[in-house]
């Protein structure tokens, strides 16, 4: 989630910074509030249960769909429980929007400060659904987010969201936010018990690697009833496999290959 750290942005205009008292109170909470492990865990557990009850999408801990409204729910719940509702008060209803991203493949979340030409500032919190939904299949290695082991997608979503909320709150109070820095890590560890600022959700390429498939691996797969052999050239949602073909395009190694796009689960690695 290093990628979620915006930097070098201009300060919030006064209108967006909101009432000075609320800002002062939020700053004090971020620097001093220490609910302790038991209270922090019981609050986050309670927020998870409430989301399960309230959301039409998040109906089970390993939910299979998610809606931006679920992120909005988490924002209100976390802001109320941990930050006295001050982020919502400072930002107003238009001040923060939520987005699900299928294109973020490394970072689990991202908080962005957006400024319109007329100077109005708002924030966007995005969560990478691709990474969430790729993880937690049977046989996947243990997932940790922010240094905490996650039993299921709901755990991972909450840890990701907590991380992004700290970014947002830091932005409001100090006009900058960096999760590699001590202040961020101190806030995240006091409020949410985070032990790291990196996520270890399994990504597609990691999952493929765990199955013995990475760039360069010799593989076999079925195509139109025939079994083909080739070499993996790229791993994204599917693998690009190059198969020797006298009529194929010529590659930099001087040989001709046909290119096949194969779902990862259809590939079998070959012993070299
Ligand atoms: Zn971050």
Image (spheres, helix red, strand yellow):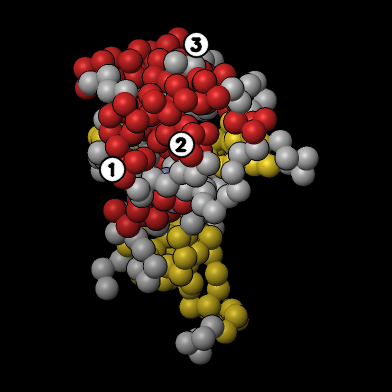
Q: Nearer the viewer, residue 257 or 107?
A: 107
**In terms of sequence position, does the residue under pointer 2 or pointer 1 come before the other?**
2
**In terms of sequence position, does the residue under pointer 2 or pointer 3 come before the other?**
3
Q: Going 50% across and 11% down the picture, which residue do you hit?
A: 54
Q: Which element carries disc 2, helix, strand or loop?
A: helix
- In the image, is residue 50 above or below residue 256? above
* Beta carbon at label 1 within 8 Å of ligand 1: no
Q: Is there any visible trace of residue 85 in the rendered image?
A: yes
Q: Which element carries disc 1, helix, strand or loop?
A: loop
Q: Quadrant of the C terminus?
A: bottom left
- In the image, is residue 229 above or below residue 163? below
Q: Nearer the viewer, mark 3 or mark 1?
A: 1
**In terms of sequence position, does the residue under pointer 3 or pointer 1 come before the other?**
3
Q: Which residue is mark 1?
A: 196
- Residue 241: percent from the left, percent from the top? 47, 67
Q: How far is mark 3 from mark 1, CA to CA?
A: 30 Å
Q: Which residue is mark 3?
A: 54
- In the image, is residue 22 above or below residue 187? above
- Residue 46: percent from the left, percent from the top? 35, 12
Q: How far is mark 2 from mark 1, CA to CA?
A: 17 Å
Q: How many marks?
A: 3
Q: How far is mark 2 from mark 3, CA to CA?
A: 28 Å
Q: Which residue is mark 2?
A: 170
């Amino acid at each position: 989630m290093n990628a979620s750290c915006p930097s070098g942005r201009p300060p919030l205009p006064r209108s967006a910074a909101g009432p000075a008292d609320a800002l002062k109170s939020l700053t004090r909470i971020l620097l001093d509030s220490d609910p302790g492990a038991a209270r922090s865990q019981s609050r986050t557990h309670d927020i998870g249960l409430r989301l399960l009850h309230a959301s039409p999408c998040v109906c089970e801990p390993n939910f299979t769909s998610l809606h931006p409204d679920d992120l909005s729910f988490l924002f209100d719940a976390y802001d109320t429980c941990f930050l006295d509702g001050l982020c919502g008060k400072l930002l107003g209803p238009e001040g923060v929007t939520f987005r699900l991203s299928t294109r973020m493949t490394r970072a689990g979340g991202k908080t962005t400060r957006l400024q319109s030409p007329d100077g109005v500032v708002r924030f966007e919190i995005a969560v990478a659904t691709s990474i969430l939904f790729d993880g937690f299949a049977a046989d996947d290695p243990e997932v940790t987010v922010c240094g905490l082991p996650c039993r299921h997608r709901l755990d991972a979503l909450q840890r990701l969201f907590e991380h992004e909320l700290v970014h947002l709150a830091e932005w409001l109070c100090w006009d900058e936010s960096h999760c590699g820095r001590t202040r961020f890590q101190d806030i995240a560890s006091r409020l949410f018990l985070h032990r790291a600022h990196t996520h270890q959700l399994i990504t597609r390429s990691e999952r493929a690697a765990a199955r013995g498939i990475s760039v360069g691996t010799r593989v076999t797969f079925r195509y139109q009833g025939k079994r083909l052999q080739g070499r993996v050239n790229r791993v994204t949602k599917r693998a690009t496999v190059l198969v020797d073909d006298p009529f194929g395009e010529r590659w930099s190694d001087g040989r001709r290959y046909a290119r096949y796009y194969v779902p990862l689960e259809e590939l079998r690695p070959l012993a070299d």
